[in-house]
Image (cartoon, rainbow, N blue to C red):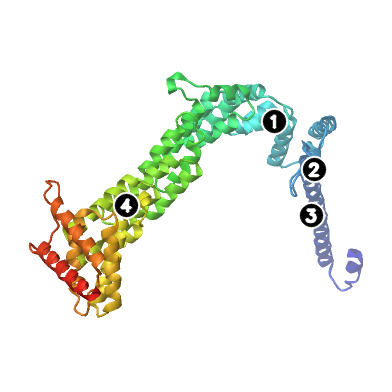
Amino acid sequence: MVLSLFNNQEYWSLSERITCLLFHLILFYDRMLYSFISYSLVVIDQTENGLVEAVAVLISKMPRMRPELEAGKLGECFKAKPDFMKAWEKWRAQIAKLECSTFWIQCAHRQTQEGLRNMLQIMLGNTNNLCTLTCHWMELYIAHFLYIRPFTVGLESMYGLAQKCIQLKPMAASHRLMGLLIGILGENIEVVLAECSKGFGPWMVTHAIEVLTAGSHQADTLLHEERDNLGGISMEELHRLVYAQVLSSHPLTWQIAPIYLTSCIKQGMGLLEMLLYKQPVDHNQLLLKNLEICRLYELDSVSSNIMKIAGMYNWKHGKKGSGVYWLQQARDEARLNRIAQQMFDSVGRSISDENFRQWEGLIQLLGSEPKTAGGLEFLHNYRDFKKSLLQIRDGKTTDAARQAVESLISLMKNPCTPQRFWLPLLHDSLKLLNWEERPLLNVLQTNLLLNKLQELSIARLRPDFIEADLPPHALSSVRLALATNLGRTTLEEQ
């Protein structure tokens, strides 16, 4: 092409033709040089890429002793040990063959060459390379399992290997997890518990004991043995008590503490009772939760005592109804009787409607059965009597008056009615005794009330008699009303 181009220039001078020829020769030489350099670079890149790909394939073919691998994980799995050993030896032979290959000479990139050969030495289990390239004894420890001793078993062998790795790669600063791991590998129960307590707190200690005793008879004996220096309890119970104490000290976690306390045979139940007694009784929801725990663990006596405490607390702080309710739930007859006595005293001192209205709700709540309510049948009957008198005052006359008379007679006949209430009852009944339309009491009923009044006059002579808070002329007013009523009813019946 150059010659044809040169020959077609018929009108060029000789110098022009020589200059054009030199130019084309230089251009041809440059093209040849460029082609040679490009070819050389392609050969070098292909060698480097080939080595990288070969190492990557070896990594992906690493034998692993397991049933299967997750998606995206490298390696070939083998279930049986013989199959794994054959694949392991074959894999290491392939690594050694690649390491002795002449392709490393053709790889011009020094850093790539060194990095790939280091990787091969690691996979071959070269101790010096592993020690140099790892940063922590734990990395060196795991590398031994992966590339040198894949079948290491037994805590004794693992502990010896860990000590060797620690010597080769000592820790610059201690870590709480490393101390725990060394204790586990060394099968030192005391060290494990100490590290758990120091680094992770009582929760870890309590639950680590469950793990330690699961597969070790020695650990089970050591941790469940009763020790005199611990007050006759075992180490397991001690740590559970400590953790339960931590839980019980916080209002949000104290309800979990019984789970651990009930598993402590020696001292658990006693501490549980103390915990339940310490809970405040002024909050109703908390009190109910406390009683529910008592029910779950069959602590009936504790539950009864807590209800008594709640009853007295509410009573003393003005919550009379709640106090009576909890005392009833606890079946505390002694305290209910004292409350009933307070009611008797209050009604006896002042028989006014305002005073009785203050106690009426409690009387209704207590009930009337003597065994469970403190013998308050009288107060219930007296409440019905007062309601009848109130209806008379509101304008309801004859029927309400007759009902009031029936309540009065029932009260005076009932042996539960205290004698000191007889005169107040009769004084409240003056309007009934002096009923204008017609006498409401017959002769028999009037004589009954006169006899009661006579008994009362004799009883007033005793030094222990309690006078009611009534006007001075109350007795004479009642006596006059009864005498008048007796005369009226006698005349009416004749």
- Disc nearest the viewer among 1 and 4: 4
Q: Which residue is mark 2?
A: 57
- Asked whether residue 169 is in view, the answer is no
> Of the residues shown, which amino acid type is indicated by label 1?
Phe
Q: Is 164 in front, or is 1?
A: 164
Q: Quadrant of the C terminus?
A: bottom left
Against 342, residue 194 (above or below) is above
The answer to which of 28 and 10 lies nearer the viewer is 28
Of tags 1 and 3, which is closer to the observer? 1
Q: Residue furthest front?
A: 494
Residue type beneath disc 2: Val
Q: CA distance from mark 2 to mark 3?
A: 34 Å
Q: Is residue 76 left or right of residue 378?
A: right
Separation of marks 1 and 2 at Cα, in angstroms:
21 Å
Q: Which labelled disc corresponds to residue 145?
A: 1
Q: Which mark is residue 191?
A: none
For the residue marked with disc 4, what is the amino acid?
Gly
Identify the mark nearer the N-term, 1 or 2: 2
Q: Position of residue 169 (x, y in %)?
A: 57, 27
Q: Which residue is mark 4?
A: 375
Quarter occupied by the N terminus: bottom right
Closer to the N terminus: mark 2 or mark 3? 3
Question: Which numbered disc, 3 or 4, marks the residue that appears first in the sequence?
Answer: 3
Q: Which residue is mark 3?
A: 34
User: How much space separates mark 1 and mark 3, taking CA atoms?
Assistant: 52 Å
**Callouts 1 and 3 close, C-beta under 8 Å:** no
Question: x, y percentage for residue 50?
Answer: 80, 44
Image quadrant of residue 29? bottom right
- Which element type, helix, strand or loop, lies under badge 2? helix
The answer to which image quadrant residue 62 occupies is top right
Foreground label between 4 and 2: 4
